[in-house]
Structure formats: structure tokens, C-alpha cells
Image: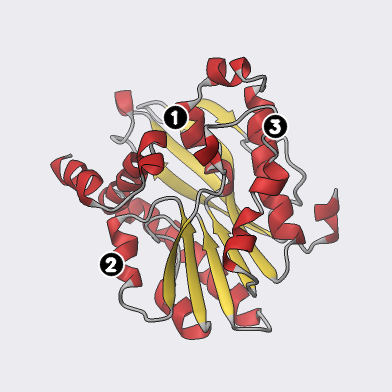
């Protein structure tokens, strides 16, 4: 905990990122990655192999953008830096692990950007996710491959803590509709933007009690227009001991091919 607190205080970050909780969340994910490496390793391997397969098939190898790059646990950065002329790591906050890895490669650039565009004070009736979720393209220009790995279902979570359900309703927003609109806008940006895209996301969550009895199962992508995952695997995000009361959380993760005809709905 002391190591996390020091990192949160000393790592460069904007006031906006700190206020919304992204600094605390980014440091916490990095710490959980270290604690739960054995449980996370199969998932990390699948993500990296999937990304490398798509990168190898990309006809142009000029620029690749990683959206919500975070601590880069699931991103094969050295390989991407060797394949593409330039690698753009785009996030509102770049944790220490990401900064250290990026410094090793002259063609890797950290881009500070809030994908949700909340610098103006948070969501409201005039908040247009379709425009805001694609704004990063104007900031960095054209790319040949866009990677979204384990980001989609997380997009509404951190700002959703800053603006809880009551706060969202006060702003004229239904929480579930607001979350679905954000995620759908991200999917549409990946689907319609120039270049190829790689979407890896959790699509089912299962919570278990200390005796491994299923407590609840949910589908965070139930309100979206997506094809079935082309491939899928399990990820023990929070093994026993990580959550209060001995509970644990496992998710199903999938690779979604947005060029699939089914993805148009």
C-alpha cells in the first residue's frame, strides 16, 4: 500500500486525471498485476498473441494507436515497436510501468488524452459520445491499426464513480443508457475509423463467494451491437483474497472482429 501511495503522489498526472480517480485506478491495476501475475498470465499471453497476429496482418506498418494503454500489462510493446514505424500510447494517465517501458523505444510516444472528454466538467444532456470518443483521431492523425484491449467495459466505470447514479440522473442521464452510449460510441469509432482495429474486451462477469459458489453473473456489453466473439477465454481478474469477504471475480474475454458482417447489426 505504501508503494502505491508513493507512486500515486510522484507519477506525473494532470489534476483532471487525479480528480476523476484515474491515477488511483491506474496504480491499483499495476499493483494487482504484480500480486496476481500467476492468475493473470494466461490472459496476458492470449491478449498479446491476438494483438501480434492482427498487427502482422496489417497491410501498412506506419502507425499504431493503443487506446487506454494503462500499465501495458496486456500490450506487447517491444514487438509493436519493432513492427510499426511509430507507436502511440493514448491514455488520460500513464502509470510508472508504462513510462518506464516507453522510454526504451525511440518510436513510442505517450499521448495524454481523456477519451471521454470530461475536461469540461462531466457528462450532461449535450454530451455527445459519438463525437467525443472519436476526438483522439483529430489529435494524433491517421493510424494504420487501432488497439483497444480490455478497455471497452471499463470506459464508464471510473467516471461513473465520480458521477454516481444519482449525480447522473441529476444531469438528465440514465446511468445504464449513458454507459451503453459510451461503449457503443467506442465500438463505432473502431468500426468506422480509417485503418484496421483490434477489439479485445470482457463480455461476461461472474462473482463467486469464498466457497466458489456463483453469486452473480452479468453481461456488461448487453446493450451493444456487437458480433459474437471470434475467440474467447477466461480471466481470473480477482482471485480469492483480492475482494472483501473472500469473494472472487472471473470474466470471459473475447476478440471481436468488427469487420464481420454481423457487426453491423
Which numbered disc, 3 or 2, marks the residue closer to the eye?
3
- Residue in front for this viewpoint, 93 or 221: 93
- Residue in front for this viewpoint, 221 or 24: 24
Q: Is residue 170 above or below residue 94?
A: above
- What residue is shown with label 3? 126
Q: Which percent across, then down, holds residue 149? A: 54, 57
From where the camera sits, is residue 124 visible? yes
Q: Secondary structure at mark 3?
A: loop
- What residue is shown with label 1? 208
Relative horizontal placement of residue 17, taking residue 34 as reference (left or right): right
Q: Residues within 10 Å of mark 3 (few under 14, many from 20)?
A: few
- Is tag 2's residue or tag 1's residue first in the polypeptide sequence? 2
- What residue is shown with label 2? 100
- Is tag 3's residue or tag 2's residue first in the polypeptide sequence? 2
Q: Secondary structure at mark 1?
A: strand
Q: Secondary structure at mark 2?
A: helix
The residue depicted at 41 percent of the width and 55 percent of the height is 70
The residue depicted at 21 percent of the width and 44 percent of the height is 9
From where the camera sits, is residue 258 visible? no
- Is tag 3's residue or tag 1's residue first in the polypeptide sequence? 3
Q: CA distance from mark 3 to mark 2?
A: 38 Å
Q: Which percent across, then down, holds residue 86? A: 50, 79
Amino acid at each position: 500500500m505504501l508503494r502505491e501511495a508513493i507512486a500515486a503522489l510522484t507519477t506525473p498526472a494532470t489534476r483532471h486525471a487525479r480528480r476523476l480517480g484515474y491515477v488511483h485506478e491506474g496504480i491499483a491495476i499495476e499493483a494487482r498485476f504484480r500480486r496476481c501475475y500467476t492468475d493473470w498470465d494466461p490472459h496476458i499471453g492470449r491478449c498479446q498473441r491476438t494483438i501480434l497476429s492482427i498487427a502482422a496482418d496489417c497491410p501498412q506498418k506506419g502507425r499504431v494507436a493503443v487506446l487506454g494503454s494503462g500499465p501495458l500489462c496486456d500490450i506487447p510493446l517491444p514487438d509493436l515497436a519493432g513492427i510499426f514505424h511509430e507507436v502511440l500510447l493514448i491514455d488520460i494517465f500513464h502509470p510508472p510501468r508504462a513510462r518506464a517501458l516507453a522510454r526504451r523505444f525511440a518510436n513510442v510516444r505517450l499521448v495524454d488524452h481523456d477519451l471521454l472528454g470530461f475536461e469540461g466538467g462531466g457528462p450532461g444532456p449535450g454530451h455527445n459520445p459519438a463525437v467525443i470518443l472519436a476526438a483522439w483521431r483529430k489529435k494524433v492523425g491517421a493510424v494504420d491499426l487501432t488497439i483497444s484491449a480490455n478497455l471497452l467495459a471499463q470506459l464508464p466505470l471510473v467516471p461513473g464513480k465520480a458521477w454516481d447514479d444519482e449525480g447522473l440522473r441529476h444531469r438528465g442521464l440514465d446511468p445504464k443508457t449513458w454507459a451503453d452510449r459510451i461503449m457503443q460510441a467506442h465500438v463505432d469509432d473502431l468500426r468506422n475509423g480509417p485503418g484496421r482495429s483490434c477489439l479485445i474486451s470482457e463480455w461476461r462477469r461472474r462473482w463467486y463467494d469464498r466457497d466458489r459458489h456463483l453469486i452473480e453473473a452479468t453481461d456488461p456489453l448487453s446493450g451493444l451491437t456487437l458480433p459474437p466473439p471470434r475467440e474467447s477465454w477466461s480471466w481470473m481478474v480477482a482471485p480469492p483474497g483480492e475482494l472483501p469477504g473472500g469473494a472472487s471475480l472471473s470474466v470471459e474475454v473475447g476478440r471481436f472482429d468488427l469487420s464481420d458482417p454481423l457487426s453491423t447489426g
